[in-house]
Amino acid sequence: MNHTAAAPHGVPETPPGYLTAPPDPTAGLRLFCFHHAGGTASVYKGWDRALRPSGINVVPIQLPGRERRVREARLTSLAPLLDALDIHLGPHLDAPYALYGHSMGALVAHGLARRRQREGRTLPEALVVGAYQPPHRPPPLAAARGMTDRELTHLLVDIGGMSPVLLEYPEWRESALALIRDDLKVCHGYRHTAGAGLRCPVHAVVGSDDPLVTAGDAQEWAQHAAGRFDVHTVPGGHLFIRDAQDTVLTLLRHTLRGSAAAGDRSGTRAQELL
C-alpha cells in the first residue's frame, strides 16, 4: 500500500493508520469493519480469529483521533473521510471484499460503497449495515446536537455507549464526549442526495432492544438497494455487536459464506451490472 499517495485537492494529507492490520491476500474475502461514533476498532477484537476458519479476514478500520491515532485530528465530515479511505483502502479493494459498518460506521461504509459504484469501481460482495437509520432519514442521535453534556452522558450510558464508570471521572468523561460529538458531526452534517441503489447485496441488522433504530427503520434501507436486500434482527440493544457478538458473527459467517468460498474471483464491478 502506498502511504505516500497525495490526498485529493483541497483535502488535508491523512497519515497511515486506517488499517489496523495488513489484509491477508490469501483469504477468500476481506471484511472491512467500521466502528460507531465514539468507538474504536477494538470493538471488533477477536472477529478475525472467529471468522478466519470460514475464509473471512476481518480488518477493523481505525478512524483518527483515538487509540493509537489519538494525536491525529479527527475528521468531522464524511467527504474528507471517504477521500482518506480511498487512499488507504483503495489498493485492497480489487480483491473480493465486504463492508460492515455499525451505527456511524454504517453511514461511512454505505458512503464508500456508493462512491465506488458511482465511479465504476469494484463493489463489495456485500454491504452489511448495523444499528443505523437509512441515509435518507435523520441519524439515530440527531437530538444530541441540542443536548447538554449531562443529558448526552446519561443517554449514552442508557444505550450502552458509555461506561457508567466515567460518571465518576470528569476529565475522562469530557474527553469521551468530545470524541463522540466530533464523530456525530459526520452524521449530522450528511445530506443525502438521490441516486441509484447499490447493486451489491445489502443486509441491514438491527438489535431487538435498540431504542434508537427499529426493524421498521432498517427495512427502509431497501430504498438504497437495487438488488438483494435483507433485514436481520439480533438480540441486544444499539451496541448489539457487544451484546450478541456470537450471534452477529454467525450471521456474518452465513451471509458472507458464498463470497468467501468464491474468493478466487474478482469483485463485482459497477459497470458490469449496468
Image: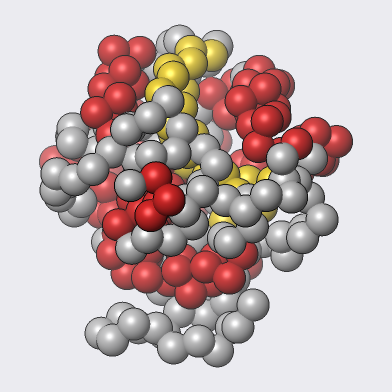
Q: Is residue 66 above or below residue 110?
A: below
Q: Residue at x 63, y 21 (%)?
A: 251
Q: Is residue 172 visible?
A: yes
Q: Residue at x 33, y 47 (%)?
A: 274
Q: Residue at x 55, y 89 (%)?
A: 4
Quarter of the figure with residue 200:
top left
For the view shown, which residue lies furthest in the right direction? 53
Relative to 264, is 64 on the left or the right? left
In the image, residue 186 lies at what x, y percent?
28, 54
Q: Is residue 71 above or below residue 232?
A: below
Q: Is residue 204 visible?
A: no
Front-lying residue, 225 or 140: 225
Front-lying residue, 254 or 80: 254
Number of numbered markers? 0
Front-lying residue, 45 or 108: 108
Relative to 74, is 15 on the left or the right? right
Assign the N terminus to one quadrant of the image.
bottom right
Q: Residue at x 66, y 18 (%)?
A: 247
Q: Is residue 158 above or below residue 178?
A: above
In the image, residue 40 lies at what x, y percent?
55, 51
In the image, residue 32 lies at what x, y percent?
59, 50
